[in-house]
Image (cartoon, grey):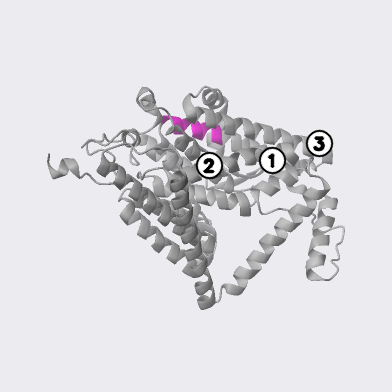
Amino acid sequence: MSRAQTMPALWHAASNRPRAELRLTSLGGMAMVFIGLLAATPVNFVGRVYIGESLLGLAAPATIPLVLSLPGNYGRLAKMFLIAMVISWLGYIGSDLYRGTPTNDYLRGWFRWVALLSSYSTLVWLGAKNVRLVVFFTLGWCLGSALYPIAAGGGMGVYAWWKFYAGFPACVIAAYFLGKMGPWIAGPAMLVMGGLSIVLDSRAIMMTCFVVSGLTLLAGRRAAISVRRGTREDQNLSKSKTVVALITLVICGAASMFVVQKIGERFGYAERFERSNVKRWTNIEIAYSILKESPIIGYGSWARDPEVARIRDKVLESQLKSHIYRSESQDELVIVHSQLLQSWVEGGLIGLVFFVVYGWNLAEKGLKLAAVCRYEPLTPLIIFILVTAAWHFFASPFSGPVRVVIIVACVLMCYLAEESLPQGALDRQPLRMPPWRRSLARPASI
């Protein structure tokens, strides 16, 4: 047996794997990139709406029944997300009606859910046909997000551009192309992207890149072991695999925190980092105080309620040790910087349903990705998207472009769920994944 037969590239499960039919330069690939570009282009309709998001939503009347009929673990999770979105939307409607939310606010709040579930239904159906369609959409959206402020004529420095517009898109695009080069290149290269991000004043992106690097190398090691043994590795979680994954996460987290501290001291970011931390913890304390008053019924879309504003002022007064003077003309809007807490504050327990399902699956699929999944070309991109989604889940509001991160993360989690199908099921449903994905589910040919 020749060396070429016995030692294929370690991140490929089979030396004779077939090619994927769908390429970035194909008609379908370019169409999804174009829609992604439009998904970064906002217009004012009922609040801030994105053109590409609306185009996906227009197909929802046709795709929702198709999503409800999808088979397998992919279809089961896709339906769960869709139903949870509808339930949360109903929770928002109930809270708005109970609280008497102003018309402009509840229309924007309701349309936010309509935009989310309609664009999700189309994207998850496309992902069932070929996950690369979703990946190409994501690449287009990232490119558009980075270029939009320049095209709109906004003047800003490199630091602000990277931190608020280009950092996340650049890392996603890099993760996609680096993933094709294998784990031993992608892992260290993502460390470099993380170093660039912290120098440009973006610690969240840096920490995400460090985690992506560590888990990419760990997945590459699992793939290498599996190929050398010529067997399909057990995809079930075990204590040893979980411990290894957790140790990797702790090391990556500790390393990123060390770098944040040193870079903060070196470039003068430390004081601003500390203010940012205080602000986030204050938001959590405000949300906790609000929820103690009404844990079951929410305060409606955007929580523009005098009672909520009074609770917020009380928390701030206790921290500032001084009285806050508020006039009637002042805006009483309270936005909690956490998708989980914001949905609870605004929609009550029913409005919380989707984010509970979403958060649980982020944890479950994230652990599976960290502990048992072998390397494939999409691994760095998937890890980056899911870690970013987890960050937004805890530390970003439910609004604006974050909706795109949510729907893409949901589709990728459905994609990960499909791998738990019994051996042979992937062959019976050949359109579910691109061929290189299906080859990874089979034992290596040696």
Q: Nearer the viewer, residue 13 or 113?
A: 13
Graded by Cα atoms within 10 Å as few (under 14), some (14 to 19) or many (20 or more), the crowding at tag 2 reads: some
Residue 126 on the magenta segment:
yes
The residue that disc 2 covers is 364
The residue that disc 1 covers is 352
Q: SS of the residue at dot 2? A: helix
Q: SS of the residue at dot 3? A: helix
Task: From the viewer's perspective, tell me whether residue 347 is left or right of residue 259.
Answer: right
Whole-number angstrom distance, CA of label 2 to CA of label 1: 18 Å
The residue that disc 3 covers is 97
Mark before the other along the chain sequence, 3 or 1: 3
Whole-number angstrom distance, CA of label 3 to CA of label 1: 17 Å
Above or below 406: residue 123: above
Amino acid type for the residue under numbered disc 1: Leu
Graded by Cα atoms within 10 Å as few (under 14), some (14 to 19) or many (20 or more), the crowding at tag 1 reads: many
Q: Quadrant of residue 65?
A: top right
Residue 59, x across and y down, in percent: 53, 29
- Disc 3, disc 2: CB below 8 Å? no
